[in-house]
Amino acid sequence: MEKLYKFLKYTFIILWTVFIVAPFLWAISTSFKDFQSVNSKVTYIPWLDFEPTLEGWRVLIKSPARGGVDIVEPYFNSLFVTCTASLISIVLGTLAAYALSRFTFKAGFVRNNDITFFFISQRIMPPIVLSIPFFIFLSTIGLLDSLIGLVVVYIVLLMPIAVWIMVDFFNRVPKELDETALIDGCNPYQAFYKVVLPNSIPGLIVAGMFCIIFGWIDFFFAFILTFTEVQLLPVKVVALNSSITPWWSLSASALISVAPLIIVAFVVERYLSKGNLSGALK
Amino acid sequence: MAKIDLSNISHTYNPKDLEPTYALNPFSMTWENGKRYAILGPSGCGKTTMLNIVSGLIKPTQGRILFDNDDVTSQKTETRNISQVFQFPVIYNTMSVYDNLAFPLKCRDFEKNKIEERVQSVSETLNLSSFLNMPARKLTADQKQLISLGRGLVREDVAAVLMDEPLTVIDPDLKFRLRRNLKEINEEYKTTLVYVTHDQNEAMTFADNIIVMDQGEIVQVGLPKDLFERPKTTFVGYFIGSPAMNLFESQLHTDNSVKINDTTIKTNTNLSKLKNDNIKLGIRSEFVKVAKDESENLVEVNIQKIEDFGNFKLLTTKMGQLTIKSKINREIEIANDKVKLHFPPEKCCVYQNNKLI
């Protein structure tokens, strides 16, 4: 019985791993192929089935004037917008969440939970509903087709995630922790950044991860709110697709756009498994 | 180290309601410098509210708090110079044990040498010396609570150390030793200690003075002996002592005696001015004895149960519908089902409307 269980367990794990890893392997192999190797017949193994070439990768850093597509600039644009918007969202979101978790607000029938729901409700609407107001808003303040404009919009999109995760997290941090800090002689601000915040690193990391993921993968707003001046990575990758799909450079660009998320995942995973985060509050 | 005056304090958590319910009814009290107080009462009786008012975590709805005659009612917690230990361990997970203990001193800008000295001293008292460099989160629950306690004790100059059932999670052996340590600390540094508990033994063995609370009301303040022998209300009689005080519905009989069913019991209390309404007689099971040659205050009872606790026997007996419990010497052998019990008059307490006469 135990053997059967073990067998089933490992079979499942192997199948799952294949399911996850295969597309990556396929993308990696495709990124080194040329037109011939992709379109003539199915090829798998470099040097045996096909002759690997770096053309797919080279195109990505060549300027358009020399026949390339240059995703370097959109790449850094995306990095800048995602990191800046995530950072600001985390800072503001954490402060808002702390206030919502620790103080009682009353305004007419509005209570803390309603305010928290208001934040989250910003994510309930389909993005298309928000696109027109955002467009008009950015064009009015002259930030359409600019990095700053995108940062502003992304803060609106990411802050609800930060607030939502952090409210829940702070609610699970016992109030006595803040009170003890006050008794030990901290003022409320010191209690927050010396005691509560260091204890909330797991929550901050989770919130940060979500913000980075949602910011990095957004295509819709990056597409609607930019034209020629500024382009973000997802828009540029999609734009690669022309009458003849360049599968090799598309694969290469897909791989490097996933790379930052994989790095984030590995770093966080390591940190988590060190036990620094798990069980920090008991 | 300070005298703490609580003057006409009361508190409600819903002050805006038409009929607010009070967690603490108005009271005044003084905590003398350097004494040990225990606040005793069932859950939800307002003990923690009282502590939080003193430490400033809660602003009382009404009344003033004075530390050495200085009004601190509107002072914030961090400026009150008080320390408080909660029921469950509260530690700073991201810091080492040493940093946890040093935190209250660092926040108040103590010198490094002084911090070192105090942390060493407290960690020795609490057996934490060998853990000082460990991350605090790696310790067990009771060691964590020792850290909480240590943070409470690390400052010598505090007005008072408030402890909210601090030893709940600690195992009995260590509990006993820690209570003794707390006593020693109190005697050495003359720190005022206030100790909230619902365990009467803890309160009795720890405190100079016990404050008994019930439903937001302070029902009795006194020495352990007074609370035991002369409980001011039937609640105190019931709450303190194990088993609880024997209480019987009774009728006034003469100026100093009452009747339970048909049995006359003499007391040392003058009952001449009382109305015959809601009278109860109370006597501790420790004072109810098997009669030898006494001629009065005798009650004939049927034995229901005899339990041997090792150091004493507990008799559970019935007189009609009434249950009477008696702690007797374990050498005494009871042969019959029926026995006569003696109520010493000086140990009988008479209550009207549940208040001691």
Image (cartoon, coloured by chain):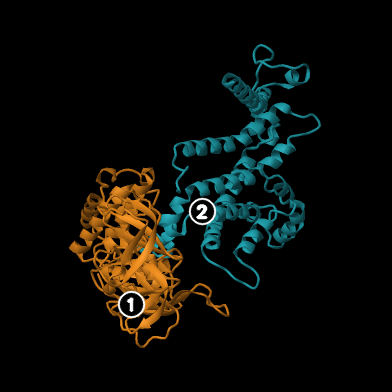
Report the residue marked by disc 2.
Answer: A172
Q: Residue at x 30, y 79 (%)?
A: B70
Crowding near pointer 2: few (<14 within 10 Å), some, many (20+)? few
Question: Where is residue A19 shown, x and y percent of the image?
Answer: 67, 26
Residue A50 or residue B252, whichever sits in front: B252
User: Which hue belongs to chain B?
Assistant: orange
Query: Which chain is painted in cyan?
Result: A
Q: Which chain contains the residue that carries disc 1?
A: B
Residue B50 visible in the picture:
no
* Tag in front: 1 or 2: 1
Q: Quadrant of residue B47?
A: bottom left
In the rendered image, residue B26, in percent from the top left (x then y), is placed at 42, 79
Apparent side of residue A244 relative to residue B238 in the rendered image (left or right): right
Hey, what amino acid is under mark 1? Answer: Met
Q: Quadrant of the C terminus of chain B?
A: bottom left
Measure how far apart labels 1 and 2 are at the Cα level: 36 Å
SS class, disc 2? helix
Residue B29 disc label: 1
Residue at screen point 41% across, 71% down: B248
In the rendered view, tell whether residue B145 sits above or below residue A236.
below
